[in-house]
Amino acid sequence: MRAVRRGFGLAPRFRGPITLAGMSAGQTGPAAVELRSVSRSFGAVRAVDVIDLRLELGEIAALLGPNGAGKTTTIDMILGLGRPDRGAVSVLGMSPAAAVSRGLVGAVLQTGGLLKDLTVRETVRLTASLYAESRPVDEVLERAGITHIGGRLVGNCSGGEQQRLRFALALLPDPALMALDEPTAGMDVEGRRDFWSAIRRDAERGRTVLFATHYLEEADAYADRIILLRQGRIVADGTAAEVRSLSAGRSVRAIWPGADRATLAGLPGVRSVELRGDRVIIQTVDSDAVARFLLTSTPARDVEIVTHNLEDAFLAMTSDDGASAGQGVPEAQVA
Ligand SMILES: Nc1ncnc2c1ncn2[C@@H]1O[C@H](COP(=O)(O)OP(=O)(O)OP(=O)(O)O)[C@@H](O)[C@H]1O
Ligand SMILES: [Mg+2]
């Protein structure tokens, strides 16, 4: 079972270890990534606070969490760009530095210099020449979906196209593990979709992919597994459906000008009450009781019951006070 901080004291269901192709059940080879009790602080800030994580070969996993949750710090340690203060990180059974130097790890970071005056193809060719062994230029252009813009100057490429170029560069050594830190930040919906379909197509060949994102729909659509981080800790780990199910309960919404917050908060099962203008939003594990109360004992109208989605789970488990039982879903920004 993976390390989990239980947001609402619920018993989450988690996937057991994945059996790798060609292995009998119970046998485990080196993980694509393994973090054992890893912590890393910057001064007083505990950026990563005792994380245990094992990614199997071929998994596509999303690191999801709000600003400052520790996503970049985690990815940097996996790439050997930062060292844990405590605990151990291994990549494909070796140190991150060894894995990177053997071309087993590719990375797409949000920033990272591209020369604007080279074309896309020239950039790939130049980078390929730096590797002792690399995949053919045409192949990585094709896999990153940028063959058609091979002759375009990098400086004229959109942000999304530049990210796909970075992805192409990361593919050159044909890495077993691809780590991407918010690779689609700032891209429009279509750019993100194109980018992810290139990644997904490529990952079908068995590559392990770990990506950090703020976009819930991205994690939901493209990851087999979602690892939710909050303040340097893993607060949930499972499939999108499993993470969603951690946020049990529903929201009841209604129009009630001047709603009596204290009375609502005192109803059994209520986790939080939020007032937004004339609207009241109640998070509860007993939506029937709240709806009945609203309809029979108050002037509230337009009562709606809404089932939680992944976004609710995310907000409930990653916001500052949402992780303690009895708190609920406070207001927070996702992206
Ligand atoms: N080099 C550094 N020096 C000081 N503090 C740092 C440094 N790098 C990260 N931190 C702090 O560590 C915490 C985790 O940062 P990290 O960059 O890992 O978060 P993140 O989840 O990637 O956030 P974001 O979504 O904003 O990219 C933050 O509080 C951040 O301010
Ligand atoms: Mg980051």
Image: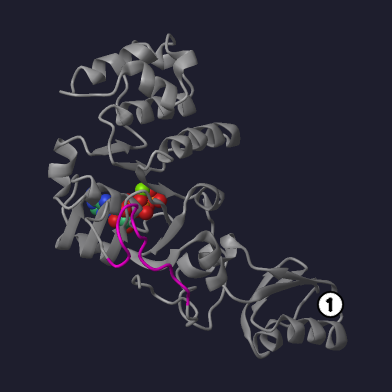
Percent x, y of residue 24: 31, 61
- Residue at position x 58%, y 65% in the image: 312
- Where is residue 7? Give x, y as percent: 46, 76
What residue is drawn where x is 24% and y is 58%? 34
In this rendering, position of residue 81 left or right of residue 20: left
Q: Nearer the viewer, residue 248 or 112?
A: 248
Q: Is mark 1 within 8 Å of ligand 1?
A: no
Query: Compared to 149, does 6 lie above or below?
Result: below
Residue shown at the point (57%, 34%) measured from the top left: 188
> What are the residue bounds of the magenta stretch?
12-26
Residue 18 higher or lower than 149, as above or below: below
Nearer to us in this view, 26 or 302: 26
Report whether 216 appears left or right of 99: right
Instruction: Count neighbours of disc 1 (C-alpha within 10 A) and say few if under 14, some if 14 to 19, many if 20 or more.
Output: many
Judge whether residue 4 can be spotted in this image: yes
Amino acid of disc 1: Ala
| Residue underneath mark 1 | 300
